[in-house]
Amino acid sequence: MASSDDILLSAVLNLLSAFAFLVAFAILRLQPFNDRVYFSKWYLKGIRASPRSSGAFVRKFVNLDCRTYIRFLNWMPAALRMPEPELIDHAGLDSAVYIRIYLLGLKIFVPIALFSFGVLVPVNWTGKHLEQIEDLTFSGIDKLSISNVPSGSKRFWAHLVMAYAVTFWTCYILYKEYHIISTMRLQFLASENRRPDQFTVLVRNVPPDPDESVSEHVEHFFCVNHPDHYLTHQVVYNANNLAKLVEKKKSYQNWLTYYQTKYERNPKIKPKTKTGFWGLWGETVDAIDYYTAEIEKLSKEEALEREKVMSDPKAIVPAAFVSFKSRWGAAVCAQTQQSSNPTIWLTQWAPEPRDVYWDNLSIPFVELNVRKLLMAVAFFFLTFFFMIPIAFVQSLASIDGIENKLPVLRPLIQMEVVKSFIQGVLPGIILKIFLILLPMILMAMSKIEGYTSLSSLDRRSATKYYFFILVNVFLGSIITGAAFEQLQRFVEEPPSEIPKTVGVAIPLKATFFITYIMVDGWAGIAAEILRLVPLVMFHLKNTFLVKTDQDREQATDPGSLNFSVSEPRIQLYFLLGLVYSVVTPILLPFIIVFFAFAYMVFRHQIINVYDQKYESGASFWPDVHRRIIVGLVISQLLLLGLLSTKNVARSNVILIALPILTIWFHIFCKGRFESAFVKFPLQDAMVKDTLERATEPNLNLKAYLKDAYVHPVFKGVEFERPTALDDEENNPLVPTKRCRGSKTQSEEGV
């Protein structure tokens, strides 16, 4: 168990690390040759010019103005200066709402911390229960927790009142935030410029027809059932193999450019490479000749594959992007059932074009449920098997664990500085390392499940990651033992005993979570703003590959908000804050520092660096709200279990109302606000359509939507497009190639 001195040492080390990262960032961002890394957003917008274009030679690389170094922390107030409406215009609603999650943490926990330190800390400190127990080792932090209050004491009434105060305050702030963000979303959608996804729906599971192709069948169905609003459509091609060839060819072209540049700089030496994997082994050949030949070979394969995809009917997937003449028509189609058979002609709002995940559109719809079932089973085993190394690490990351496993190190471990480092810093660092590769695994699992947009992949991966953190980082760090031993314990004991089992262990793990917060939430966030990996990669590319300004732009990786990782990580801090606000309030200041620091850092990154891959209009917010509610309910159940071991009269009766009220509150918010995040009001759609017809009467919408949902590998290639009827009301009969007597679902609407 980490002592107060261990926590102090950890705080000093992490604060020094964070300060070192910030100083390094503040100096590096001032250097002209790093400008594209730390202000890449402005370069993408075409607003910022490279400082290397003028001035003396040294000034092109190094900032020699000493006055700027004095103001090296001026990025902090600058990050807070941009108003929220301007931030939405600059970076999008997704980014602005993501930032509000950190602000929400401050709104919830700052008042709770003030109240807890004013009421609970004195109550716990003066309980003096731990001092009365002989041969018990405890720290100063334990004296500030609920563990220092003797069983049966009337002091626990303060904790009961605090539990209600935390619940009501959290629900009040959540309600206000949900209302604000739902209003922001509707205003954003109403004021947003015209986008293809506003007029388009994704249609999946198109039924086969013996007489018509998929394209003809789609056109016939929507001309019949949406005669006044159907405009055009684009069928989906299975171009995954073609996309792989294009990507491989692009990679080879980059290598060819690299070797050509290298040869131009030193014509005396012809560059060589090996034909094996990544040029690590195989026959040594002339690099330029090798990659030139490989590119020619791939170009021929690409042309053959492109022709095959465009001419083979089997390459057409039973899905299509269907566009309408108005937003109103698209909204009606996306939000209604198209056929009496609910398993075919399935419609949903189309993602915006840059949000489409093309690889999954070719997956047959009947496979999706099977894939999801398999991934659910795989995720279950991943979650519970992953707890084994974490439990092992937690046992090792202690003085006793290391002495038992490595007795040779006992003299070194007994040194005060080493001992403090092991107990105060090492557990959080090891846990952080274990979690590095996990997001990539979870994203791969979500892709296998078949989601068709990047935003849905992010949301699904975030859900998996949150559950994983809940089970492994939170519960796995609280309860010792192997994963299936814990699972067996929970299965064998009554459900009412589970909160008691976990609740008793919670105060004992407060110091571990404090160290984890400092490692992950302080030093980790400071490392985020330094962008060390993108900085190194930019200079490597700039040294070896860049020849033109266009090359330099492509060498810059602005990055983006990794919602599937960062949002679940935030939720862990909400969970810890809600659980420990009543049990060990001393943890709250560490969480508040995280939220305040992260708010400032990510606001700076969003303004100056990140370039979002897509814009979903804050469609992730219901998930954020739901997970905070889950954390609140968990905190209530664990407090109920903990107090049930303290012989507090009527505590179960008093506390059982809290989870019931919290769940009712969630149901109320879901009914009140969630529809704004899954549906588009027909009234708003009609208003935008009417305004657009009045301001742009000659708009050629079909030309605008022509290539919006063409697979990226087909950009610039002409297709045989459907000739939709321009005036359906003047054409009582819809042309079809279907033979007489052949009836399909599309005719049921005639």
Image (spheres, rainbow, N blue to C red):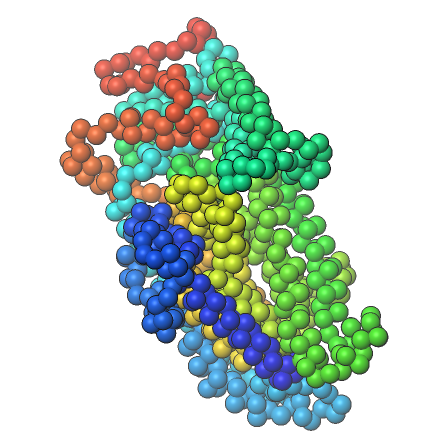
Asked if residue 728 can be seen in this view, the reply is yes
Quadrant showing the C terminus:
top left
The percent coordinates of residue 349 (x first, y second) are: 40, 37
Q: In the visual, does 352 lie left or right of 158?
A: left
- Residue drawn at x 41%, y 27% as measured from the top left: 715
- Residue drawn at x 62%, y 63% as measured from the top left: 432
Q: Identify which residue, 492 or 301, lies in the foreground.
A: 301
- Decide: is 627 above or below 285: below
Asked if residue 750 can be seen in this view, the reply is no
- Residue drawn at x 27%, y 32% as measured from the top left: 326
Quadrant showing the N terminus:
bottom right
The percent coordinates of residue 694 (x first, y second) are: 15, 35
Could you say which quadrant of the image residue 142 lies in? bottom right
The percent coordinates of residue 748 (x first, y second) are: 41, 19
- Residue drawn at x 28%, y 62% as measured from the top left: 83
- Determine the residue located farthest toward the front in the rendered image: 268
Q: Identify which residue, 640 or 524, lies in the foreground.
A: 524
The percent coordinates of residue 541 (x first, y second) are: 50, 46
- Decide: is 268 above or below 60: above
